[in-house]
Image (cartoon, rainbow, N blue to C red):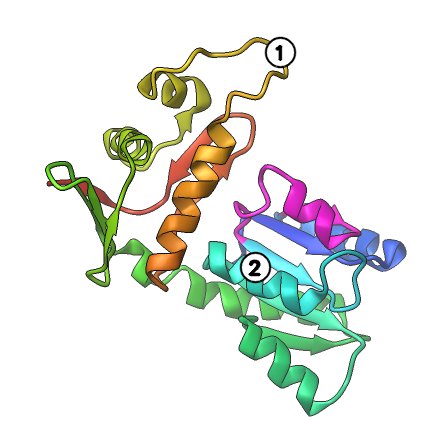
Amino acid sequence: MQPKTLALIDDDAEYSEFLAQFLQEQGIAVSRYDDSNALLAAPEAFSYEFYLVDLMLPGVSGVDLIKILRRRTDAGIVVISGRLGPEVFREVITAGADMYLVKPVQFEQVALAIAAVQRRVVKPSPADAAWKLDRSSGELVAPDGTHIQLSEADRQVMECFAAAGGEPVTREALLQKLGREVPDGETDDGLSATIYRLRRRIERATPTLVPLQSKSRVGYVFRAPLQLI
């Protein structure tokens, strides 16, 4: 059991190249990043089904990267690092990693670790529970029962996601719903800022995983059941 997509974040170019090649031969689409900031700047940063993370990285540290990923995705995260010590293991597991492998490690062992964690990932999780959008009160209700007051723009965006039924919603459709013009070229349309504020509003209100993700070259998707009430 393997994920379809995987992000490999490691600044050892030779190691990551050969590991990526091995995993691709197992049918996994691998994207390599030699800098944690490069991953976080990518439109698809939180859309991968799995992450392999080194700890000693340029940019955001490996531990901080794990914390950021865990706030945005329930995907499997395996650490592969040369750092040793019980305090390191405790640190990465507390941050949200599923497993910790110490370099040097055989590629076959990495594949086995990915498969073991993936079995956990594909099981039903709290993110699969229904969210509810109360149009009368302008609130979003999280699966844990938390009521989140939305702005008018937030409510319009969430109505788009509810109508999409879990499918991606294009930037153009969201802008039209918000009554904004669709810009030509690289003009900033403000949609990214709107989505960011909505996500942060939800994250501050509830520890429940926020299933709002960007969809590369398309728009955004709400990867959980969303009911209009």
Q: Tell me, for residue 185, which label it has, or none.
A: 1
Outermost residue on the top side: it is 184
Residue at (25, 31) in percent of width and height:
159
Residue 213 in sight:
no
Would you place residue 16 above or below residue 63 in this image? above
Outermost residue on the bottom side: it is 86
Q: CA distance from mark 2 to mark 1?
A: 31 Å
Other-residue count near label 1 (Cα within 10 Å), few / some / many at <14 / 14–19 / ≥20: few
Residue 135 location (% of width, % of height): 15, 36
Q: Which residue is mark 2?
A: 68
Q: Quadrant of residue 98?
A: bottom right
Q: Quadrant of residue 89?
A: bottom right
- The answer to the question of whether label 2 and label 1 lie on touching residues, with beta carbons closer than 8 A, is no
Residue at (62, 76) in percent of width and height:
92
Residue 29 location (% of width, % of height): 63, 44
Nearer-N-terminus badge (2/1):
2
Q: Tell me, for residue 228, which label it has, or none.
A: none
Would you place residue 70 above or below residue 182 in this image? below
Residue type at the position of mark 1:
Gly
Horizontal side of 143 relative to 176 (left or right) equals left
- Look at the image and give the residue range highlighted in magenta: 29-49
Residue 93 in sight:
yes
Foreground residue among 199 and 15: 199
Secondary structure beneath dot 2 equals: helix
